[in-house]
Amino acid sequence: MQLTIYADKCTYLAANATTTNYDSETFFRLKVATNLHRHPLISVPLSEIPDGAVIKSATFKAYWYDQSVGYDPEGQEVRLTRQRRADWVASQATWNVYKTSNNWGTAGCLNTTTDIDTAYNASTYFRADLDYGWMEWDVKSMVEHAIANSLDFNVLMRAFGADFNNAVFYSNNYATDTTKQPNLVIEYTIPSGWFMFL
């Protein structure tokens, strides 16, 4: 069986605007540059996945649609890392805080003890020649961990490599074509006889 679940929270954190919240935007930005990093945060609810489901595959998808002129991120890594703070608030999160009056362990959601769990990562790479469209990550282990711990799918997105400026993705607020919002595509099975024990 296949299930597509859309993100219900998206924002991004900007190192050059440490107290600004971007939850209302229809996009999120990803950037690598000294003191100008931009880190998207994304959450997808997992309550639609049936109890007892065995995850066969899980793919996170985000639609890349724009890039600042003069920059080509071809071949650069885009990494998702499990975000530890289930209580982050999209309408309040900034570079400094995950919700009002509550600081990240390290600004930008970078503390490996309190903010992110680097045991759970997934990577993909920008395609050649600014070929915009869907980017996909294999997140099976991250989804399995979330389900096992009664969590939603919460991730931090970062880019690695040479400086580039503002790769832009549609967020959960993009209403012109809602099918281009970030989403999880999950393939699963229900073991035979599972419901006999409910």
Image (spheres, rainbow, N blue to C red):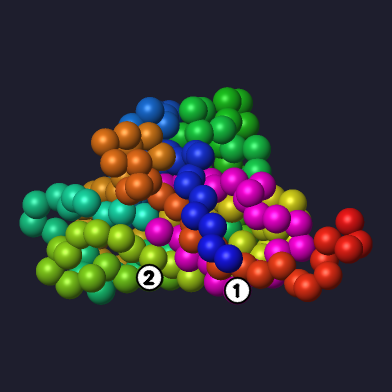
The residue tagged with tag 1: helix, strand or loop? Answer: strand
Q: Is residue 25 rendered to the left or right of residue 121?
A: left
- Quadrant in which the N terminus is drawn: bottom right
Q: Is residue 96 rendered to the left or right of residue 172?
A: right
Instruction: Residue 111: tell me if it is visible.
Output: no
Residue range (magenta): 39-61
* Image location of residue 20, percent across then percent down: 39, 29
The residue lying toward the viewer, choosing from 111 and 117, is 117
* Image location of residue 30, percent across then percent down: 32, 51
Instruction: Residue 59: tell me if it is visible.
Output: yes
Q: Which secondary structure is most common in the magenta stretch?
A: strand
Q: Where residue 193 is drawn, which disc sits there?
A: none
Residue located 37% across and 34% down the image: 173
* Image location of residue 195, percent across then percent down: 83, 61
The residue lying toward the viewer, choosing from 113 and 146, is 146
Q: Can residue 167 be found in the magenta stretch?
A: no
Q: Can residue 56 be found in the magenta stretch?
A: yes
Q: What's the residue type where badge 1 is placed?
A: Lys
In this figure, which residue is indicated by the disc labeled 2? 124
Image quarter for residue 77? Answer: bottom left
Image quarter for residue 73? Answer: bottom left
Vertically, is 144 above or below 14? below
Q: Nearer the viewer, mark 1 or mark 2?
A: 1
Residue located 69% across and 50% down the image: 151
Residue located 59% across and 46% down the image: 45
Residue located 27% across and 68% down the image: 126
Q: What's the residue type where badge 2 is placed?
A: Thr
Q: Is residue 154 rendered to the left or right of residue 91?
A: right
Q: Is residue 16 rendered to the left or right of residue 133?
A: right
The residue lying toward the viewer, choosing from 198 and 26, is 198
In this figure, which residue is indicated by the disc labeled 1? 56
**Could you classify mark 2 by the number of other residues whose Cα lies within 10 Å: few (under 14), some (14-19), or many (20 or more)?**
some
